[in-house]
Image (spheres, grey):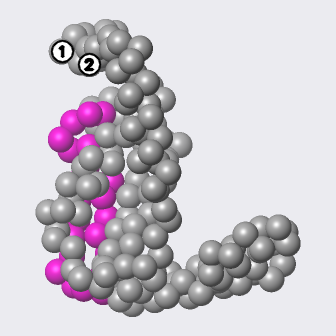
Amino acid sequence: MSERRGHSFTPHEFERLSTEEQLSRAHEFELRMRTRRTVRHFSPRRVPRELIETALSIASRAPSGANQQPWRFVVVLGPEIKRKIRIAAEAEERDNYERRFPHEWLDALAALGTDWHKDFLEIAPCPSQSSASTTALPLSARRSKERLSITMSKNPSESLVGF
């Protein structure tokens, strides 16, 4: 851990790889990325709280400008809230399909069997949304254990929120 302008940070330890190893890793990564898919089919099985908290903790450390990690995460658990989100998302998507999307886009979506219906938003056990905040965090909040606070209500109609 080092100090720079009053901020502590851990310097990056660079590992120089051979050209062959770099190419091997790049090709392996490309093969993995070619299997990446958007998923709209979910199991309704409950996700353990610890797994949700761990995923949020990891996601909160994603790189960002000036190492600020201005991320905000919301994971919805309650069926009433999921229903409201689905209704709002479907209204927006219906408008996209009927008025906004160009024909080329609609043709590409039709081939995937995708439409404006979003039933998966109610089936998924904990749909989530992430966003970046433009509000700067105070120095004391950066990179501390308090950086990610998680509130989980015992009431199943409420949501889990990570800040």
In reply to whether residue 161 is colored magenta, the answer given is yes
Q: Residue at x 28, y 14 (%)?
A: 15
Give the residue type at disc 1.
Met
Labels 1 and 2 touching (C-beta < 8 A): yes
Q: Which residue is drawn at 14% across and 63% down?
A: 50
Q: Residue 9 carries which label?
A: 2
* Residue 22 coordinates in the image, percent (x, y): 40, 21
Q: Specify the quadrant of the image occupied by residue 94.
A: bottom right
SS at circle 1: loop
| Residue 68 seen by the camera | no
SS at circle 2: strand
Q: Answer with left or right where residue 45 lies relative to residue 123.
A: left
Q: In this view, does 23 lie above or below 84?
A: above
Q: Answer with left or right where residue 104 lies relative to residue 6.
A: right
* Residue 10 coordinates in the image, percent (x, y): 24, 18
Between 50 and 110, the one lying in front of the other is 110
| Residue 128 seen by the camera | yes
Q: Distance between the residues labelled 1 and 2?
A: 5 Å
Please give the range of residues in magenta: 142-163
Q: Which residue is drawn at 26% across and 55% down?
A: 55
Query: Dot 1: few (<14), some (14–19), or many (≥20) neighbours within 10 Å?
Result: few
- Closer to the chain start, of discs 1 and 2, is 1
In reply to whether residue 21 is colored magenta, the answer given is no
Q: Name the residue under label 1.
A: 1
Q: In this view, does 163 lie above or below 75?
A: above
Q: In this view, does 19 lie above or below 42?
A: above
